[in-house]
Image (cartoon, helix red, strand yellow):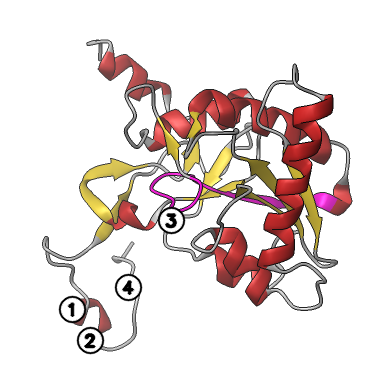
């Protein structure tokens, strides 16, 4: 079998990747001819979530929101780009503020984060409300939020397929680990998967600077990774 060519003419030669270029190296895993049926999260390496949302590839998207300023958040771009909605960035942030005020009076013992719904007709936004008096989400917040979001999606074919942002390095609604740093992508995936999420995740733009490390296209990662970390073959 001859080597697969990706491009016509001299395209393959012209597009040989230099080590200094931003890139992601995808590792193969599993048998493409077999169906496992196991719940998984697909990693959409190289794809752009806003393009895919505007193109109608998803019916639901999960992201973050806060009650003060979302101007640099993904939700701001979604509300700007998806037509036919009565929601604006200002009204969405105002709604988050009103909701926050209401629960502070009537549901003080509830566990955060809450999930707010914004129906844009062609797209449903499930927005995790950032916990009060915090400038970030924790991994535990993501677990709780995605567990709630799962209940809103399960059994609702009209709300699938679903995609999510990674929350890593976000400017308005970022996630941090227990040390206050950006969590690993694996840690975020683990929190979401443990909560029951089975949709698509779009890695952060910073992922393009990870070419020295091989990446997988789905989570859970292969068991060989865990064995290698444990020191076994």
Residue under pointer 2: 10
Q: Which residues are magenta?
A: 159-173
In this view, which residue lies farthest toward the bottom?
Answer: 9
In the rendered image, residue 48, in percent from the top left (x then y), is placed at 50, 66
Secondary structure at badge 3 equals loop
- Of 22 and 83, nearer the camera is 83
Height in image: 194 above or below 120? Answer: above
Q: Per the image, is 177 magenta?
A: no
Asked if residue 160 can be seen in this view, the reply is no
In the rendered image, residue 136, in percent from the top left (x then y), is placed at 47, 37
Marks 2 & 3, CB-CB < 8 Å contact: no
Residue under the image location 22 percent in, 51 percent down: 211
Secondary structure at badge 1 equals helix
Q: Looking at the image, is mark 2 or mark 3 earlier in the sequence?
A: 2
Q: Looking at the image, is mark 4 or mark 1 earlier in the sequence?
A: 4
Magenta segment's dominant SS is loop
Q: Looking at the image, is mark 2 or mark 4 earlier in the sequence?
A: 4
Residue under pointer 3: 45
The residues tagged by marks 4 and 1 sit, at their Cα atoms, a distance apart of 10 Å
In the rendered image, residue 98, in percent from the top left (x then y), is placed at 77, 47
Mark 3 or 4: the one toward you: 3
* Mark 2 crowd level (few <14, some 14–19, many ≥20, 10 Å Cα): few
Residue under the image location 78 percent in, 31 percent down: 103
Residue under pointer 1: 13
């Amino acid at each position: 079998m001859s080597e697969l060519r990706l491009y016509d003419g001299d395209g393959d030669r012209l597009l040989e990747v230099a080590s200094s270029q931003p890139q992601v190296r995808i590792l193969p895993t599993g048998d493409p001819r077999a169906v496992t049926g196991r719940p998984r999260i697909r990693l959409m390496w190289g794809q752009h979530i806003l393009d895919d949302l505007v193109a109608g590839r998803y019916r639901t998207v999960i992201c973050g929101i806060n009650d003060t300023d979302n101007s640099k958040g993904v939700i701001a771009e979604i509300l700007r780009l998806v037509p036919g909605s009565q929601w604006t960035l200002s009204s969405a942030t105002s709604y988050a503020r009103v909701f926050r005020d209401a629960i502070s009076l009537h549901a003080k013992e509830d566990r955060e984060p809450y999930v707010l719904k914004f129906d844009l007709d062609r797209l449903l936004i499930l927005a995790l409300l950032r916990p009060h008096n915090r400038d970030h989400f924790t991994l535990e917040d993501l677990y709780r939020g995605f567990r709630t979001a799962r209940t809103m999606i399960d059994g609702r074919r009209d709300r699938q397929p679903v995609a999510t942002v990674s929350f890593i390095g976000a400017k308005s609604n970022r996630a941090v680990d227990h040390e206050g740093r950006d969590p690993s992508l694996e840690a975020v995936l683990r929190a979401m998967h443990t909560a029951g999420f089975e949709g698509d995740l779009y890695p952060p733009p910073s992922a393009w600077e990870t070419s020295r490390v091989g990446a997988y296209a789905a989570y859970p990662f292969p068991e060989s990774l865990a064995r290698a970390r444990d020191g076994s073959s």
